[in-house]
Each structure stands twice: as structure tokens, then as C-alpha cells.
Image (cartoon, rainbow, N blue to C red):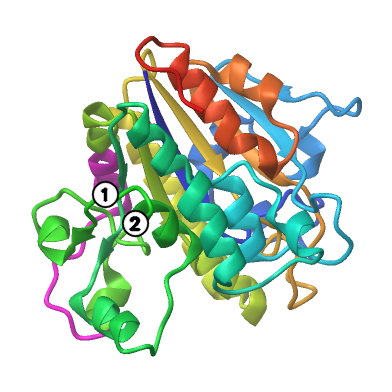
Amino acid sequence: MSVLMIFVDGLGLGDDNPAKNPLVTAPMPNLRGLLGGAPLARTVIPGDGQPYEGDVATLVAVDSCLGVPGLPQSATGQTTMLSGVNAAAMLGRHLSGLPTPTLVDILRRHSLFKQLVEAGRRATFANPFTPEYFEAVNSGRWRHSATTTAVLSAGLPVRMLADLQAGRAVFHDVTGETLRERGYDVALVSPREAGRRLARLAREHDFVLFEHFLTDKAGHAQDWESARHWLGVLDEFLGGVLDAVDLDRTLVMLISDHGNVEDLSVRTHTQNPVPALLIGRGRAQAAAGLASLVDVTPVILALLAGEGGTACG
């Protein structure tokens, strides 16, 4: 079995309100097709709080507040999601941006990637890096995100632009368009083809993580045009994944760390639950175990351990 996690930063389950939620108005036929024609909104979840169960997909409303007052934030949310440790509770607050030394220590000791590698599993981060990124980190001008810290904590190699050019990686914007805007000589990739490339990585690994954060950026800017653009790209990307992934052996999990883009009436994050859209093998088991971001790592470890081999933990 394999798990393919599509992590979309800043994507909550908001109201079915076209005046503030671009997920209601954006053309997203692939995602709507998984939800009986409905948009990705809280109204899809039954009134009793149980998951939405479709023929192909299950949708769970996942708590991102973690029992801590205030608006959920990226550093603590992502650390929690990728470690199984309630980082916000440990800090006593939600923390935005990049992880502090306390959060880095959590990831170095408990990272999902680290636990998978120690269990003999094949794990990878699908996003490639530019050489300039590591130059900025080494010079102290930048720090690693929670996702990058989680990968590096396992001693795993990262993908670079050469991997992107060879079709062995997917840039965070899916198509490579922002890379070209920054002057990189890379070929544009259609969202559908990028999704098929990600699906191929899932055939070669037990766990694959892909990260997209431009939804969060659009939410903070309250930019309707940008939000609708990136949601459309992600929808076609998901369609490409489903074109090529083997759902008899793979669980596709689309999940977020906190809400934002689902409510463009505000510039801040939201306290909305985040979606866990589950498609493929093990979706019922995953849905039963997902209540908050704390559960993401344990659920993935349990799914993969249940397929034989060394137990993770």
C-alpha cells in the first residue's frame, strides 16, 4: 500500500456562500464529481458530524484548532500534522510562518518521514528545490519550513530542478509558471500531466508528500482572481492524479493545516475545520481515525504498518 498526501495550505471547509467562498464559484469539476456535484464546503458534511461517504471519496472535517485559543497557524499546524505531536499545545499558542527551535526539535524527533524511514518504508517529498533556496538557508537569510524540516530529519535526499525537468518532481505551483516568472528556463507542465507525474511517484514509494501554498497566499491577499486560478489548477491536478493512480493500492489524502482561502471576507486564517478528502485504499480506516491534525501521522503509520513489514511508531 502507499499513501499520497496532497497538502494544500490554507484550505478550510467554509460556508456554501458565493459572496465569500471561491470554492463555491471556482470551476472544480473533478472535485465536485467526488462530492456528488457539491462544492468543497462544510455543507457536504452530514448534520451529525459524520464523514461524507461517496461512491469514490470520503470527506472528513478535521479540527485544526488543537484545543488552543486563537486562529490556527502554519508552523504549529504543519508540525502537528507531520509529527503527531500537538505543537500548539506544547507552545501554548498557535505560531505562524516557519518553525522555531522547539518545533524543529519536535520534527527532528517525531517526523512522519523519520518514523517511516526507520520502519523501512520508502518516503519522498515530491516538491523540488532551487539551488538558490539552499544558498539562502546556508547564509541565514531563510529558514526551513516545517515540511522541509520533516523531510530532512529523516536524512532523505531532496528533489532539485533537474528532477523537475526529468518529470520526477512537481513544483509547488503545479505547472512551473511561477518558476518561469522568476526567470528559470523550465518547461510548463499542464496540471493534468503534473498530477500523472505525482501518481507515478506513488507507485514507487510507500509515502509521497506534495505541498501547495499559493491558496494561503491568495487568501491573505483576499484575491478572488488568484484564488479561483489556483483552485482550478488544483482541481485539474487532482484529476490528473486520479487518471493515473492505482486506487487499489494507494490512498490519496488531500488535507490542509488551517482555513483561509474559503473565506475571502477576511485576510486572516479561520477556525473552520479543514478537509481530509480520502480516495482509494484504506479510506474507511483513515476516516475513522481522523478527528484533528494530531491524528494525521498516526493514521498514516497505522495504515502502512497494517500492510505488513516493520510496524511504525
Residue 194 within the segment the image draws in magenta? yes
Q: Residue at x 48, y 46 (%)?
A: 111
- Location of residue 74 by image quarter: bottom right
The answer to whether residue 99 of the structure is visible from this angle is no
Q: Position of residue 35 (x, y in %)?
A: 63, 31
Q: Secondary structure at mark 2?
A: helix
User: Dot 1 surroundings within 10 Å: few (below 14), some, or many (20 or more)?
Assistant: some
Circle 1 residue: 156
Question: Looking at the picture, which amino acid does disc 2 mark?
Answer: Leu
**Left or right of 100 on screen, residue 123:** left
Q: Secondary structure at mark 1?
A: loop
Q: Residue at x 37, y 13 (%)?
A: 248
- Vertical arrangement, residue 245 with respect to residue 275, above or below: above
Q: Residue at x 52, y 16 (%)?
A: 282
Residue 8, disc: none
**Left or right of 17 on screen, residue 174:** left
Residues at discs 1 and 2 in contact (Cβ within 8 Å): yes
Which of the pair 221/155 is nearer the observer?
Answer: 155
Residue 152, disc: 2
Which of the pair 111/279 is nearer the observer?
Answer: 111
Q: Position of residue 71 (x, y in %)?
A: 80, 66
Alpha-carbon span between mark 1 and mark 2: 6 Å
The answer to whether residue 269 of the structure is visible from this angle is yes
- Vertical arrangement, residue 287 with respect to residue 132, above or below: above
Which of the pair 263/127 is nearer the observer?
Answer: 127
Residue 82 within the segment the image draws in magenta? no
Question: Looking at the picture, which amino acid does disc 1 mark?
Answer: Leu
Q: Which residues are magenta?
A: 182-198
Image quadrant containing the N terminus: top left
User: Dot 2 surroundings within 10 Å: few (below 14), some, or many (20 or more)?
Assistant: some
